[in-house]
Image (cartoon, rainbow, N blue to C red):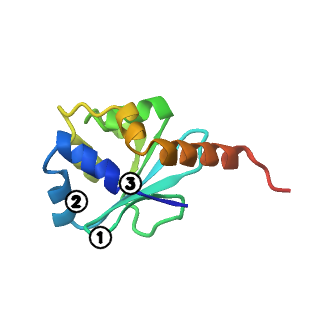
C-alpha cells in the first residue's frame, strides 16, 4: 500500500515555505515510523517521490518508535533521541526544521482525511490479525 504525500507537503508548505526546496535539494530521505500497535511504515521524501508506504525501503536513515499521540511532537520540532533508532543526527536535523511551525496531527489527517485514516485502520487490523 502506498499513499502519495503531495497534498500533505502542499499544505505544510503554506506553514513552512522552504519545505519543498529542502526536500528537492537534498538527497532522498527515507525513514520508518513504528507506531506501537500498527505495522511499521515508511516515508520516502525526494524530488520525484513523496510517499507513505508499508513496503520495506532500502537505505532507511532512521526509525521513529512511539505512540500515536507522541508523533505530533516530531512535527513540532520537539525531537527526543530516545524515540529514534538509527541516525539520530539526521532525524533531529530534519524535524528541528519544523520548530516554531504549528503542525498538528489533526491538520495532517484532515489533508489526507480518508486516505490516511483508512491506511491507519488497515495497518491496525493487519497488526492484530494472525495468519494460521
At which x and y percent is residue 93?
A: 21, 48
Give the quadrant of the C terminus: bottom right
First in residue order: circle 3 vs circle 2: 2
- Position above or below: 42 against 71: below
Name the residue carrying label 3. 62
Quarter of the rendering containing residue 61 = bottom left
Using the numbered discs, state the Cα–Cα distance from disc 1 to disc 3 in whole angstroms: 21 Å
Residue at 15%, 58% (x, y): give it. 21
- Whether residue 40 appears in this view of the structure is yes
- Position above or below: 72 against 17: above
Q: Nearer the viewer, residue 63 or 27?
A: 27
Q: Is residue 20 left or right of residue 126?
A: left
At which x and y percent is residue 2?
A: 50, 61
Residue at 37%, 39% (x, y): give it. 108
First in residue order: circle 1 vs circle 3: 1
Furthest-right residue in this view: 132
Q: Are marks 1 and 2 in contact (CB under 8 Å)?
A: no
Name the residue carrying label 1. 48
Name the residue carrying label 2. 23
SS at mark 1?
A: loop
Q: How many marks?
A: 3
At which x and y percent is residue 101?
A: 20, 34
Using the numbered discs, state the Cα–Cα distance from disc 1 to disc 2 in whole angstroms: 10 Å
Quarter of the rendering containing residue 11 = top left
Amino acid at each position: 500500500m502506498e499513499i502519495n504525500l503531495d497534498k500533505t507537503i502542499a499544505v505544510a508548505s503554506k506553514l513552512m515555505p522552504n519545505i519543498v526546496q529542502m526536500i528537492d535539494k537534498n538527497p532522498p530521505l527515507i525513514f520508518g515510523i513504528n507506531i506501537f500497535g500498527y505495522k511499521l511504515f515508511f516515508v520516502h521524501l525526494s524530488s520525484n517521490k513523496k510517499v507513505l508506504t508499508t513496503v520495506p525501503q532500502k537505505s532507511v536513515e532512521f526509525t521513529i518508535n512511539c505512540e500515536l499521540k507522541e508523533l505530533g511532537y516530531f512535527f513540532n520540532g520537539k525531537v527526543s533521541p530516545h524515540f529514534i533508532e538509527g541516525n539520530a543526527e539526521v532525524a533531529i536535523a530534519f524535524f528541528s526544521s519544523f520548530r516554531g511551525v504549528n503542525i498538528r496531527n489533526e491538520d495532517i489527517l484532515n489533508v489526507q482525511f480518508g486516505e490516511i485514516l483508512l491506511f491507519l485502520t488497515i495497518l491496525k487490523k493487519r497488526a492484530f490479525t494472525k495468519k494460521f
